[in-house]
Image (cartoon, coloured by chain):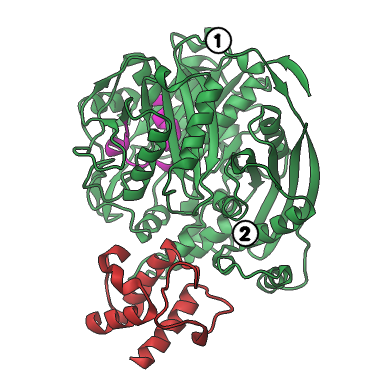
Chain colours: A green, B red
């Protein structure tokens, strides 16, 4: 261990940004929000209210790619920073990318349905020097992308990063949420006593993050801190205590060097499901932020999934500069366990610093702090080294996967009833992690000081194909929630969080092959004293073929 | 009723992936949720689908008929009263 200069002294500025929502471009979206206008309308196609973004279709690019490219070209044109240089990186946040391609063929999965293939096409269009980093972490993806971007810039690996998020709506997504009975028949009403579910929307957003103050124009909003946590409670149900989200908020505020009295406002996830909003109010209370003006933007633009963290962060940074926040559309009367400072109308705030949060399937939570104050953060800190203490690769087998994995499970001598309900990728990971931790365990490490960082190429395409096959049958009872819940790669990580009480960072990257990204990110988590132990590695399962290799990284004290 | 209980257990085992569990293993009157079978909120949603798929019984959510979700017995009774 050595004392070094803190690289966190590097400031990360938010520069040019662009969004496309169901309310229009950035200027149109902000104007509509100021006027209290929602873009959510009933759709005959999806049989539910949704927010549809206008998109210039092209022959060459899909709807998802076109929406992303529009924002990226805007940011590049406005900032003058492009991605052709060594020192710049593109970070893409999405939950499902071109998943509508799966409807064409579930057996031979079309190339375009792979997130890395789609990202590569975008990178080629923009002539990116570096391969884009893809984050698919359920509904926290966008906020996660800022946390990862902050690491890449603070550690000096790059000077500029463009964070871009998008998800395009399709039946794959709408039917899944419908099977969870979490869609409201009317435009959603975040935090309202009569709220009865969320409304889906589609959107895209992109924003430049840079370490150079000069190129960020007039903007003086800094990305001051960020953290990711896990409830380790349930893969789809929000925590009943709010502890996971509280940890993320608290750690993000600590990193930013701010206390609750420094915060001007909070922009939450606020999906308008009964349990999400209830959980958030508990976490906000723990963080002593109940008296801060708070809003959810979902009533205007819906829950935009992988775009939400990016789009809502961009809007929050605009609100920071304006000195007021937009009202919470749909909110009228509170019934959350803790009274929040929420209003259907515009609210002004004092301190030019805000917290943005998100929570998602897999039990994940994320929070970032945006700050306009030029705060000095402590300059000296511990620099902690780390070491891989165990490694396990799930062996290949002559047997079909189902038989192989059942034998492995029985050999462990366990009776966890949940195992058989899991997706095949989760089962493969489950066995590999059991074996890994039998070599060297988490021992006495606190849950919040444990992390899991995984990557693969196929995301959850194996589980996606199962959900799509059910949809293709057009059953009167609709989709299966038990199948849909696994259509997010990070849910497999979430299963490990529950099983082994991992409450620290949980991030899922998508890449064409293991580039060492998970190890680098894992080491940074220990180096920066965020956790003491990280389970990291490659977790791939698709159509009966697996490649699971996990390692345990520990701090050297 | 006895036939319905047996059939319902078979559907639960099949649709909820209760591997290693047989019809005999499921206590008709024991709570479905909690420790026993390890069922959770996703299973509750799947049970709603079972009711619709096999018995034409429609429910908006499991809270709508919470007492019916207590055990296999209460579920069977609910089906008897509401099936078409």
Q: Residue at x 47, y 49 (%)?
A: A361
Estimate the spatial distance between the alpha carbons at disc 2 and disc 1, rounded to whole Å.
45 Å
Label 2 SS = helix
Report x, y in % for residue A113: 54, 51
Q: Is residue A487 left or right of residue A302?
A: right
Q: Residue at point 54% right, 24% down?
A: A254
Mark 2 or 1: in front is: 1
The numbered disc on residue A30 is: none
Mark with earlier residue (2, 1):
1
Magenta span: predominant SS is: helix
* A135 w.r.t. B30: above or below: above
Please provide percent x and percent y for residue A235.
50, 54
Q: From this view, report whether residue A292 is shown above or below residue A271.
A: above
Residue at the disc numbered 1:
A376
Q: Is residue A404 left or right of residue B59?
A: right
Q: Residue at x 61, y 63 (%)?
A: A424
- Check residue A425 in the rendering and tell me which mark sits there, or answer none: 2
- Same chain shared by disc 2 and disc 1: yes
Q: Alpha-carbon neighbours of circle 1 within 10 Å: few (<14), some, or many (≥20)?
A: few
Q: Does dot 1 land on a helix, a strand or a loop?
A: loop
* Residues in magenta, as a range: A295-314
**Chain of the residue displaying label 2:** A
Query: Any magenta on residue A471?
Result: no
Q: Nearer the viewer, residue A166 or B32?
A: B32
Q: Chain letter of disc 1?
A: A
Rendered location of residue A496, percent (x, y): 61, 53
């Amino acid at each position: 261990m050595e004392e070094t200069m803190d690289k966190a002294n590097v400031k990360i500025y938010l520069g040019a940004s662009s969004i496309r929502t169901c309310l229009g471009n950035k200027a149109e979206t902000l104007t509509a929000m100021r006027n209290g206008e929602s873009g959510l309308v009933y759709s005959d196609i999806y049989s539910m209210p949704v927010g549809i973004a206008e998109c210039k279709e092209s022959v060459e690019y899909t709807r998802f790619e076109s929406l992303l490219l529009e924002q990226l070209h805007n940011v590049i044109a406005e900032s003058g920073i492009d991605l052709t240089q060594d020192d710049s990186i593109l970070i893409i946040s999405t939950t499902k990318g071109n998943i509508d391609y799966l409807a064409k063929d579930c057996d031979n999965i079309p190339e375009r349905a792979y997130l890395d293939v789609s990202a590569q096409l975008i990178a080629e269009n923009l002539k990116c020097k570096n391969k884009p980093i893809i984050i698919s972490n359920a509904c926290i993806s966008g906020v996660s992308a800022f946390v990862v971007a902050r690491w890449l810039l603070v550690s000096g690996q790059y000077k500029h990063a463009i964070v871009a998020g998008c998800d395009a709506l399709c039946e794959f997504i709408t039917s899944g949420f419908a099977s969870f009975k979490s869609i409201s028949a009317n435009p959603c009403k975040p935090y309202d006593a009569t709220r009865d579910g969320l409304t889906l929307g589609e959107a895209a957003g992109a924003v430049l993050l840079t370490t150079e103050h000069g190129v960020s124009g007039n903007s003086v909003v800094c990305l001051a801190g960020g953290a990711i946590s896990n409830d380790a409670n349930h893969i789809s149900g929000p925590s009943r205590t709010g502890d996971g989200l509280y940890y993320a908020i608290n750690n993000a505020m600590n990193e930013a060097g701010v206390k609750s009295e420094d915060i001007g406002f909070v922009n939450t996830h606020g999906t308008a499901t009964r349990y999400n909003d209830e959980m958030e109010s508990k976490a906000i209370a723990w963080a002593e932020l109940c008296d801060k003006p708070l809003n959810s933007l979902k009533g205007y633009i819906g829950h935009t999934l992988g775009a939400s963290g990016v789009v809502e962060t961009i809007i929050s940074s605009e609100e920071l500069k304006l000195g007021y926040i937009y009202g919470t559309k749909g909110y009228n009367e509170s019934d959350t366990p803790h009274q929040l400072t929420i209003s259907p109308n515009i609210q002004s705030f004092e301190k030019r610093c805000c917290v943005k949060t998100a929570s998602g399937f897999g039990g994940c939570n994320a929070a970032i702090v945006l700050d306009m104050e030029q705060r000095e953060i402590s300059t000296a800190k511990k620099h902690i080294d780390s070491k891989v203490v165990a490694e396990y690769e799930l062996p290949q087998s002559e047997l079909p996967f189902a038989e192989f994995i059942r034998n492995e499970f029985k050999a462990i001598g366990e009776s966890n009833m949940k195992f058989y309900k899991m997706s095949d990728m989760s089962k493969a990971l489950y066995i590999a992690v059991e074996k890994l931790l039998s070599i060297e365990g988490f021992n006495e490490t606190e849950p919040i000081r444990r992390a899991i960082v995984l990557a693969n190429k196929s995301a959850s395409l194996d589980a996606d194909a199962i959900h799509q096959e059910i949809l293709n049958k057009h059953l009167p009872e609709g989709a299966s929630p038990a199948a849909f819940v696994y259509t997010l790669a990070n849910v497999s990580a979430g299963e490990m969080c529950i099983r082994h009480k991992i409450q620290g960072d949980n991030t899922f990257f998508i890449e064409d092959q293991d580039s060492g990204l998970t190890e680098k990110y894992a080491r940074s988590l220990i180096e920066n004293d965020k956790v003491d132990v990280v389970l990291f590695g490659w977790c791939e399962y698709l159509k009966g073929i697996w490649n699971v290799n996990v390692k345990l990284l520990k701090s050297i004290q | 009723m006895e036939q319905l209980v047996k059939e319902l257990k078979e559907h639960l085992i099949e649709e909820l992936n209760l591997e290693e569990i047989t019809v005999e293993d499921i206590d008709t009157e024991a709570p479905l949720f909690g420790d026993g079978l390890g069922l959770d909120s996703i299973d509750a949603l799947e049970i709603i689908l079972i009711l619709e798929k096999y018995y034409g019984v429609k429910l908006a959510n499991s809270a709508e008929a919470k007492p019916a979700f207590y055990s296999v017995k209460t579920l069977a009774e609910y089906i008897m009263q509401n099936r078409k």
